[in-house]
């Protein structure tokens, strides 16, 4: 299927940010977007790139009422030699299709979506920032567009991709964040939608996150929904803890997002010969280790956040400083390794980088 490209008129072009050091996350979008439509019996059609702009949607569109939405987050980087690198893009498209299946939405045509994404990035390539720590964030999204008020899967969908230059996700940048362990609200239960990347998971996380922010925390660390006993994830990141010589992360048991950066960290540390356990980790074990000095480091992983060190964990009103409130040695090493591969500062021994220009 041919992708139709309609370029923005000169007067529709936006002003690009002039200072890359001031880029935050999520406020700036480029001049174009990619779209394609799906309907029952017809499948995907009309792949197109258009000037970025609002989408006309029926007020009865099912996404607005019953939340059939899935999305992804990946990045393009300006490589050391001026080329453009993507990081494990096929993983994001596999995941959007697993999310779509959970939400009774159609499977995205991965070849068409990837082709559209690359075309879009190349068309708006002047928007890709160049300095380390900055990138072009890519947000593939699918929504149910059929106007219908009965509860059932929709029969029409829109898939679209928007892109925009970003810097660090947290205002702290690479400085350690403070996290609040949430022991009342839960993010997701086993059997729910926790492992799908869908808007409802984020909507349900907001109240606890807002309350935590008012108290000075950056994020909430979720515990399992059944017992409030085991560490799960931090809504925007998967979590890792170094207790003595063991690096521990929660297993993918159905309520946790299977992060691409999480998977990359696991692969890297295995290569490095570090003892890695994907196991249920009781919060009491983390706190006991923090109290007697065995908790060496804690960090989050995510596409937006990359590696984000945790400098303080607060549980039941007690603060526990982690790694002296600094970025730990392993967190630093992992950050350097992942960034070096993404920006092409070193050869990619993992086969993760896809060069598109
Ligand atoms: C990402 O890391 O790409 C995410 O999607 C996390 C958040 C910005 C929703």
Image (cartoon, helix red, strand yellow):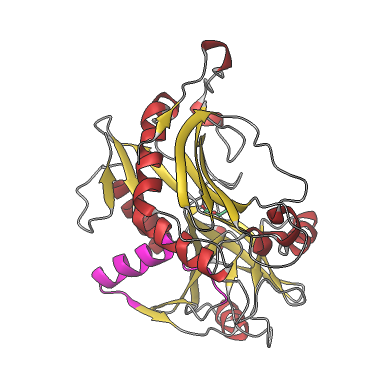
Residue 134 at least partly seen: no
* Residue lying furthest bottom: 227
**Which image quarter is the N terminus in?**
top left
Taking the spot 65% from the left edge, 50% from the top edge, the residue there is 145
Taking the spot 65% from the left edge, 79% from the top edge, the residue there is 189
**Figure label count:** 0
Q: Nearer the viewer, residue 248 or 91?
A: 91
Q: Is residue 345 magenta?
A: no
In the rendering, at what x and y percent does residue 292 appear?
56, 81
Relative to 226, is 136 above or below? above
Q: Nearer the viewer, residue 117 or 135?
A: 117
Is 253 positioned to the left or the right of 184 in the image? left
Is 107 positioned to the left or the right of 115 in the image? right
Is 324 positioned to the left or the right of 1 in the image? right
Relative to 272, is 148 above or below? above
In the rendering, at what x and y percent does residue 52 appear?
56, 29
Q: Nearer the viewer, residue 61 or 76?
A: 61
Q: Which residues are magenta?
A: 255-275
Relative to 166, is 298 above or below? below
Is 74 positioned to the left or the right of 275 in the image? right
Q: Is residue 260 magenta?
A: yes
Relative to 175, is 85 above or below? above
**Which image quarter is the C terminus in?**
top left
* Residue lying furthest front: 41
Taking the spot 68% from the left edge, 81% from the top edge, the residue there is 225
Residue 345 at least partly seen: yes
Taking the spot 42% from the left edge, 57% from the top edge, the residue there is 92
Q: Quadrant of residue 126?
A: top left
In the rendering, at what x and y percent does residue 44 appear?
46, 50
In the rendering, at what x and y percent does residue 299 appear?
50, 63
């Amino acid at each position: 299927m041919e992708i139709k490209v309609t370029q923005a008129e000169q007067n529709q072009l936006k002003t690009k940010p002039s200072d890359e050091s001031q880029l935050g996350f999520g406020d700036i979008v480029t001049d174009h977007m990619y779209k394609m439509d799906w309907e029952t019996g017809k499948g995907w059609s009309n792949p197109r790139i258009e000037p970025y702009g609002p989408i006309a949607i029926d007020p009865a569109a099912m996404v607005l009422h019953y939340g059939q939405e899935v999305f992804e987050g990946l990045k393009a980087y300006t490589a050391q030699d001026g080329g453009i690198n993507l990081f494990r893009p096929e993983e994001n498209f596999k995941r959007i299709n697993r999310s779509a299946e959970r939400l009774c939405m159609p499977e995205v045509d991965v070849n068409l979506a990837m082709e559209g994404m690359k075309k879009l990035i190349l068309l708006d390539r002047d928007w890709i920032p160049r300095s380390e720590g900055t990138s072009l964030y890519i947000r593939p999204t699918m929504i149910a567009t059929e106007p219908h008020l009965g509860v059932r899967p929709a029969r029409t969908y829109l898939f679209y991709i928007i892109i925009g230059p970003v810097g660090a996700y947290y205002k702290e940048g690479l400085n350690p964040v403070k996290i609040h362990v949430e022991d009342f609200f839960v993010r997701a239960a086993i059997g729910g939608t926790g492992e799908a990347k869908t808007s409802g998971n984020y909507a349900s996380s907001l109240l606890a996150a807002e309350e935590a922010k008012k108290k000075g925390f950056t994020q909430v660390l979720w515990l399992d929904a059944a017992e409030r006993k085991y560490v799960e994830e931090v809504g925007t990141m998967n979590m890792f803890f170094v207790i003595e010589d063991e690096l521990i992360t929660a297993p993918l048991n159905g309520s946790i997002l299977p992060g691409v950066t999480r998977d990359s960290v696991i692969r890297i540390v295995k290569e490095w010969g570090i003892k890695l356990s994907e196991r249920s980790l009781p919060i009491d074990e983390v706190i006991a280790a923090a109290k007697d000095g065995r908790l060496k480091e804690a960090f989050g992983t995510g596409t937006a956040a990359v590696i984000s060190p945790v400098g303080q964990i607060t549980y039941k009103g007690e603060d526990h400083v982690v790694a002296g409130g600094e970025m730990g040695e392993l967190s630093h090493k992992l950050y350097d390794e992942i960034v070096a591969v993404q920006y092409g500062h070193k050869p990619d021994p993992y086969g993760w980088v896809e060069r598109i220009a």
